[in-house]
Amino acid sequence: MVQKDKFDNPTKERVSNENTDESILYLVVPCYQEEEVLPETAKRLLKKMKDLMEARQIHPKSRILFVNDGSTDLTWKTIQSLHEMNPIFSGVNLSRNKGHQNALLAGLMTAKEYADIVISMDADLQDDIEAIDLMLQKYTEGYDIVYGVRSSRKTDTFFKKWSAQTFYKMMHHLGVTMTYNHADYRLMSKRAIDGLEQYTEVNLFLRGLIPLIGYPSTTVEYKRDKRYAGKSKYPLKKMLAFALDGITSFSIKPIRLIANLGFIIFLISLATLAWTLICKILGRTVAGWTSLLASIWLLGGIQLLSIGIIGEYVGKIYNEVKRRPRYLIQDIILEDKEEEKVPN
Ligand code: UDP
Ligand code: MG
């Protein structure tokens, strides 16, 4: 296929630039139980894509790629009927629910085979679609990665705001570079996604990983809206797991902290030992019950915590060495893909 040949040529970075100035844009949208919002999301995204095509800002082969992350509702059916209505809608169906980050990765990896630019966004219309214009503008200025950054968190609950802030602060102290208030609404060039492909870790935390790729990057601001319909797919438990993944995937500082803590406690215990010995020699026996009990609890607690944190890392290593696939694609509906299958 023509496009494939162009793609195979590694010196040709931007696939569609050969005959035209327009680039092929793929919008990647991970969806989990989103039957309630999908029709509206599809309508709004379609309008945006049409406007951009009319303005000759993007190539007519641009697509909206929904990734169904193993939903048990009508999400995949909806994607299929959208594709029948208009082939601009495409879909990737994962074999089961693999979580937002993996679904996003599946979308990015599929899209990069056909696209020059990929923009990822949530399905619930929280990300302001109008920011796409700004992102594309930054891309034409030469940026490979453009992070969408929320200008306000008014629509978030107090708890979400507070926990997000604490998380960013913690990550910063642990030495992880992350763009503040950036969710996964971002533009990436094909080159940047090719770079991302080389990071093969199973414990995915894209927000921490993508800044490591390098390449020119910038941010654009947008207003984050309320979820259009349906419930958040990030309940507290998932949010905490996500934060813990972020920390332990990017920093070994917690383990060092434990080692340091252990050392300090060892010094203190030496001092205590010396002190009790002196007391004994001087014949001043201490009642000791309280301090004994307190130290047992304190040490027990610290030890358990330490073992827990170490266990977290050991678990990570266990997951990484297994090298299991991060996602499996069950079906793909994509017009360009179907074309490829036709023998020449
Ligand atoms: N999502 C997904 N798989 C999951 C959970 C969520 O693909 O296991 C998608 C979801 O459909 C949405 C995006 O990830 O498009 C963000 O989820 P959500 O809006 O529920 O999170 P919140 O905005 O509340 O943090
Ligand atoms: Mg949301």
Image (tube, grey):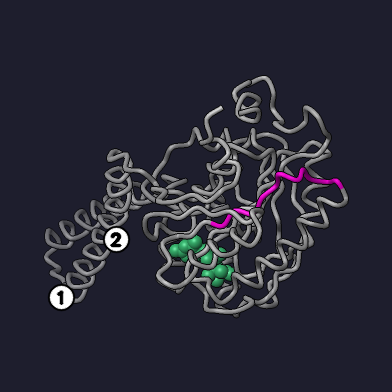
Residue 305 numbered tag: 2
Residue 259: x and y, percent? 33, 47
Whether residue 73 is visible to the viewer of this picture, yes or no, is yes
Q: Tell me: 317 left or right of 205.
A: left
Q: Which residue is mark 1?
A: 289
- Asked if 73 appears above or below 50 in the picture, the reply is below
Which-is-in-front pick, marks 2 and 1?
2
Judging depth in this view, the residue of 266 and 283 nearest the camera is 266
Q: Which residues are magenta?
A: 56-66
- Asked if 205 appears above or below 289 in the picture, the reply is above
- How many numbered marks are there? 2
Q: Mark 2 or mark 1, which has the lower sequence index? A: 1
Residue 264: x and y, percent? 33, 51
Judging depth in this view, the residue of 85 and 233 nearest the camera is 85
Can you tell which quarter of the image residue 87 is in?
Answer: bottom right
Can you tell which quarter of the image residue 42 is in?
Answer: bottom right
